[in-house]
Amino acid sequence: MFDLGSSRDEPEMGNDGIGQGRLRRAVPLVGLAARGAGEALAARLRGGRTAAERTEFHVRSAERYAELLGHSKGALMKAGQMLSFVAASPAVPAEFQPIYQAALAGLCDDAPPMAPRLARQVLERELGHPAEQAFALFDWEPLAAASIGQVHAARMHDGREVAVKIQYPGAADAICADLKNTELLATFLSLTVGGISPRKLSFDLRGAAREMGERIVEELDYRLEAANQAEFAEFYSGHPFIHVPEVVGELCTGRVLTQELVRGLSWSEAVAADQELRDQWAEAIYRFVYGTFERIYMFNADPHPGNYLFHEDGSVSFLDYGCVKRFRAEQVEMMDAIVGACLRNDVLGTWRACVEAGFFKSTDPVTPEEVFAFWREDWATLWAQQRFTITPEYAARRIVRRCSPTGPSANALRYTTMSPEYTAMGRIEIGVMSVLGQLRAGTHWGSISAEHFESAPPTTEMGKRDHAFFDGRQLAGHP
């Protein structure tokens, strides 16, 4: 910890370094697109690339994306973070996926931070008083720096260790400028989804950009995030392996969020840990994501591994609640009806449930068998009768089945009319599968789904502890 007075005499806040204006922020991205297109044209004129040249091209492209996005902050960098955890995007040739993943992974942990003087000025402007009034100690070197804000360790006067997230000055304006310029995000998506792929995907870039923008803008209001986090923290208070840090409400504003400081293993450390621990962490993540949806109809809609801290006892701390998706009970029931029919191998029942949910029209030129395969195939985590290991290869097959317009479910995807309200589910599914695949997690996944859909007793040790916790809450009169 550094003394609070160490940066008091630094200059007043000036230019925050975040590029402002729609044209200024679009120019570097357009330049990157032009450079990539020029290289591709030159290769075609030479008669194509060799294997070594193709690899070199993808390495250069990945490094350029990471460098540009890491310094842009705002919506572009957030978009890069969203894509960085996808283990196997159908748009990227399999042999080049690790290149992009490795280059963009740095956006999770090592975003360029703002200067200490700027952090102090934002903090004090938001709180309305000097930092010393709220904190006994404050470390002006950030613990983490991300797309919208950075996190500092501090100690309150009552001794509590806290993490203080401070939004970059100008970040909200930069993001709003990005989101007004739909073409900017669409250009980014065309590069990452279409530009690096030899395949032409029928993909609504502008619609995807709008959906991504809606999710990003929710993260600008730290009061909203604090309220979301407090709700999750209350629901999981005392849980044996799911931990949500408590919020210090009196020290939260629109651009400052103060919460309990949690220390643990990072994602890079977690993937290198013993397999037994990785299996426990994976089950904790799975139960947190889908258990919250089934019990209180909510998703923490940012399943990014940088938002997890891992502990040696198999527990996981879940951070970042800026993007929370809430569903109505009837929406959850419709999804349960589809999955339940699949579990029973009921082809026509699955089709009827999808039509009733509005995902397909009864007149669509799609067979019940195609719809059933879209939901049932490559979803072994739900129906495996024995221990099943989720590998990166399995995760890739599942993502292709569920998301690729040129994959085995292309016809079903072509006629899907799923409401935009459900689009968060796709991102969550891809994110969770990618995380579990990289952990190479194995457990009795089918028994976890049987707990909900068949009221079966839990068979895993973590499942027994989870059920005991929620049974205890009900006996104590909690919802």
Image (cartoon, helix red, strand yellow):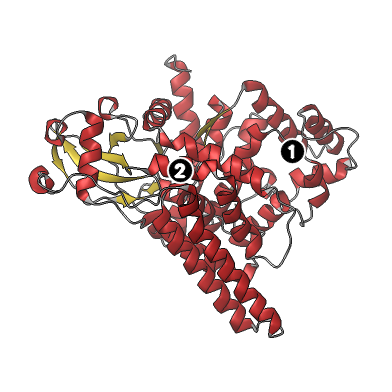
Side (left or right) of 261 relative to 320: left
Three-letter amino acid code at disc 1?
Leu
Q: Residues within 10 Å of mark 1 (few under 14, many from 20)?
A: some
Residue identified by numbered label 1 = 343
Q: Secondary structure at mark 2?
A: helix
For the residue pair 354 and 199, the one nearer the viewer reads as 199
Q: Secondary structure at mark 1?
A: helix
**Is residue 308 at all visible to an observer of this figure?**
yes
Three-letter amino acid code at disc 2?
Ile
Q: Residues within 10 Å of mark 2 (few under 14, many from 20)?
A: many
Residue name at image x 64 percent, y 63 percent: 195
Q: Dividing the picture into quarters, in which one does residue 371 lie? A: top right
Question: Eyeballing the image, is 106 above or below 421?
Answer: below
The reply to whether dot 1 and dot 2 touch (C-beta < 8 Å) is no
Task: Tell me the distance, in whole angstroms, between the alpha carbons under discs 1 and 2.
Answer: 43 Å
Discs 1/2, front: 2
For the residue pair 149 and 125, the one nearer the viewer reads as 125
Residue identified by numbered label 2 = 175
User: x and y percent of residue 313 in the render?
Assistant: 36, 47
**Is residue 280 at all visible to an observer of this figure?**
no
Side (left or right) of 212 relative to 323: right
